[in-house]
Structures are given as structure tokens and as C-alpha cells.
Amino acid sequence: MKTLRVKEDALLSYQIEKQSLDARKKPQLSYVYTVAVHLKNEKEFLKKNRNANIQAASENRYHMDVSGTEALRERPVIVGSGPAGLFCAYMLAKAGYRPLLLERGMPVEQRKKDVEKFWETQSLDPESNVQFGEGGAGTFSDGKLNTLVKDKDGRGRKVLEIFVKNGAPKDILYVNKPHIGTDLLMSIVANMRKEILASGGEVLFHTRMDRILQNENGTLQELLVTDTVTGRSRHIKADICVLAIGHSARDTFAMLDEEQVKMEAKSFAVGVRIEHPQKMIDLSQYGDTTLPLPAAAYKLTASSSDGRGVYTFCMCPGGYVVNASSEQGYLAVNGMSYHDRAGENANSAVVVTVSPEDFGGSGVLAGVAFQRRLEKAAFATGGGLVPIQLFEDFCQGKITENLGEITPQIKGGYAFGNVRGIFPEEISRALEEGIKAFGRKLPGYDRKDAVLAGVESRTSSPVRILRGADMQGSIRGLYPCGEGAGYAGGITSAAMDGLKTAEAIARKYHPFDKET
Ligand code: FAD
């Protein structure tokens, strides 16, 4: 009211649109807010307003256009219940399309048990793990929801609203870097499944899509699916298949390649997870303050001497490094956190971009083969446990013998090994140079006892499944979607792509419930 220079009775309502922390003058910190207000006599107020910080708010309301006229013979099938498939199924179910959602992994309740067993015993279930199962790769994650994708159509806002409707804290609608945490994500994902079922959809778990059958005109006809518990296979008739399989379904990528679905190899990034004390990161970001602030995050970039981009990725404040493998004999790491982000270490991936020239092979799946080479080396280096090495020893290519002041916070067990040896030397060198350069920006980042774990290899999809402006792939009726198809990178952007795909279907076909 002071900023607006209005009296209390002129204010009808207000809502926080955005909250961010300004730490430029640390340790003096302040929150900066954007607030949407409704006033009596708004038009008059705006005419007289001379304050550049006050503007008419633009309404960015999301709308799904359900104007399709073609009739569907079969229910839309969605393969994969990660953010892309789940949000696509949710929107289609709410609009009356009665989608069928197929997920190779287990419902989240069982999946949690399978993942915990894996972390305790290293006994991997290749169908129910950190990558596969209800909620997709994002379920055991930090649950960061920020995205670089512009939100001119309001899809990003809609995704956050759906999360809130299904149990996420309301502050994700306005904080600058919204975050949910793996503990809350599990119940949110289960709530979304219940909503899909209540709206006429169906969800089949431990059901893997193994083959796509098309007719001579290149139009989708049927899907071959296998119950991964009983091993029984059957055909499902389908007009539409949304392919939201994520970046780790290597067997499905191979099948698509055999079916000559148009795909191309794409660049991604590989590297290590690095752990530091969260207190050190807080001090660098906030200064010496006793204010009760959230665990601080960071983002750093550098260039190596041979011109490779090195950057931090998927930073998890107060989090854990996790064994995120999905294939027996191969090992990949990632990071996760709980909602409170109260873990003693901060971790982040430090990665280097690799492009098809680095893969050392040809063909669409050369990137997958490259990932597998690194993951096999990581598995061997740690003897099946997550291999770790202190930064000082990484620089010398020497196996660590003792930890320094940092106790690794790793889910899945760890062992000392030469993490540097997992990579081609030019990548190891770029990582070393990058971490040293980060140390000049964030004091202590390159400390000798920073703990490095390998291998971070699933940063994004190694392939892109091509799609046209109508969102369909080279088989008519196939809708490549989300991160695995190469159209998203992260939870929110994958979910937004799920919405975009649902919109494309709704513009073409009319829902079943409109007929009845
Ligand atoms: P996915 O989430 O990978 O989902 C694909 C689903 O398809 C899987 O459930 C899989 O089982 C299923 N599937 C695959 N093949 C088949 C088949 N043939 N038949 C049936 N089902 C199939 N991103 C963020 O934005 N913030 C974070 O904090 C974050 N932290 C992460 C932490 C971890 C540990 C991991 C592994 C990832 C993290 N990510 C994070 C990345 C994020 O999870 C992914 O970007 C996102 O989940 C991609 O969504 P998607 O729906 O495209 O694919």
C-alpha cells in the first residue's frame, strides 16, 4: 500500500507472484517481491501512475484447446509415467480422452522399496530403479522445478498449479527456484495417478512397450507390450502412442532404430558429482549471516584450455549423491534431496559437453554406446559401488586412501577408485581445469578434499526422436515427447512438453466423453 500510495480500503486482494533473494550486498540480504494486486478503480489508478515499478499485470492463463474433430477408435496410449507422460495423461484424462498409461516399472510405493533395497544390497532390478517406475527419473530427485524454457503460453505455470493441486507446497508458485524434494514428489505422483483413474484413465504398471507395429502406409496399428513380472506379452490396438520413455530406455531406443523410426544422435554432457560442505556453500552465497535461510545453491561455468564448456548441473543443496544405475554391470550417479534439504553436503554434477564426434562410433545410438563405456568403467572402478576420489587425487590420477573433512553423503555405498580413469583424458583434463576455475569464483570449490563420484552420464538424452510441427514422429500416430525424445531437460520442461503433446492430440481428435 505504501508503494502504491493507496489506503487500505482501496486494496481488494493481493497475491505474491515472485519472491527472490537479493544477495548482491551480502551479508546484507533482502527478499525482492513481485506482487499482483487488485484495486478499486484500477484503470484510474494506472492512468495516474508514474512509478515504473508498478505495471498493469498481464494475465497469462493457460488454455487447452479441445477442438479436434477426428474420431479416435482406441484410447490414446502413453508410454512412460515420468513428468512428460504423467502430465500428458493427466491433461488428456481431465479432457475426457480416457488415456491408457503404460509404465514398465512399479508403482511408487513398491518402487521406493526396490530402490532402497538396491542402495543397501546393490541388487538391481532393471525394471524398477532410480530411472524406471512411476514418476520417472524425477521421483528420486532434488525436485528442482526451475526451467529455462520461456512460458509465453502459461504451460510452466499450469504444471506448477497441477503439482500444488496434487500436494506440493504453494510456495512453488512464486519462489524464484522452486523445489519439491523426493519425499513429497512420491505422494504427488501417486495423487496424480489417482486423478487419472478417477477421470476415466487407466494405468498399467510393470508393462513394457516392446514393439511398435505399423501398416504399409507408416501408420501406427498396434503395440506389443510385456508384463515384466509374468513375462507374458500381448498386443494392444492403438491410433496414438505418446512416446515419453525418458533418456534411459536404451532397449526401447534400439527397438525404435530397428523399426526405422527417424532419430538422430545428439550432444549431451558427462562428468562427475562433487560434494562440499553445505556450510561452505552457504557462506559463499549468503556471507556470514545467522538468518534462517534455505540451503544455498550455485551455478558455475568455465571453459577448458581446449575450448570445451564445463558447467555445474543439477545442483542439490543439502542433498545426497545416489547410485542411479538402471543396467546390471553399469554404474551412473545423480543427485537427490528431501524437501528440507537438511543434508550436511551440497552436491552438483560438474560436466563437459560431448558431441557425436566424441562418441567414437557412428550411427544414431553411438551416444548410448559411449555412455555405456563410461558406466561400465565406473562399475569396474568401484567394484559395483559408487567410485569416489578426492579432488587432489583426481588431479594426480591416484586412488584415494583416506577421506578429508568431508564425509560423502552417498546412497548406494561407495569405494575408493581412480575416477579420473573412467574418462578419456581430454574430458578428465577439462573437468580438472573447470573445477580449478570454479575455485576462483567460489572459494573452496577446488579444495583438496572435495569428494568426486562417477559417473554422471545421464544428463540428457543421447538421441532425438524427430517430430514435425504436428508433434508426430515418422510413424503417423507416434508422438515423441519429453526428455528421452530430446525435447526437454528436467522435470518442468518435460511436464510442459507433456502438456504440449496433449494439446496437439486435443486439437486433432475429439474426446470420448464429448460423444456420450
Ligand atoms: P522420465 O522421467 O525418464 O520417464 C520415462 C518413463 O518411461 C520411466 O518411468 C520409464 O520407466 C518409462 N519407460 C521407458 N521405456 C518404457 C517402455 N518401453 N515401456 C514402458 N515404460 C517405459 N530434473 C529436474 O528438473 N530437477 C531435479 O532436481 C532433477 N533431479 C534429478 C535427480 C535424479 C536422481 C535423476 C535421475 C534425474 C533428475 N532430474 C531432475 C531429471 C528429470 O528427472 C528428468 O529430466 C525428467 O524426469 C524427464 O522426464 P521424462 O518424463 O521425459 O522421462
Image (cartoon, helix red, strand yellow):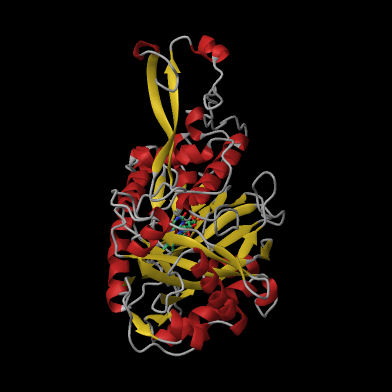
Q: Position of residue 346 (x, y in %)?
A: 37, 64
> Foreground residue, 506 or 412?
412
In the depicted structure, whether residue 33 falls above or below residue 363: above
The residue lying at 28 percent from left, 71 percent from top is 117
Q: Nearer the viewer, residue 412 or 303?
A: 303
Residue 501 spot, x, y in % from top left: 57, 44
Give the vertical position of 392 relative to 187 (above or below).
Answer: below
Q: Position of residue 22 (x, y in %)?
A: 44, 44
Report which quarter residue 127 is drawn in. Answer: bottom left
Residue 458 visible (yes or no): no
Q: Residue 33's spot in the image, x, y percent? A: 43, 34
The answer, for residue 515, to whether it is visible in the render is yes
Against 278, residue 123 (above or below) is: below
Q: Nearer the viewer, residue 55 or 233?
A: 55
- Picture residue at 70% right of the left edge, 76% below the top: 362
In the rendered image, the quadrant that contains the N terminus is top left
Identity of the residue drawn at 46% across and 58% down: 298
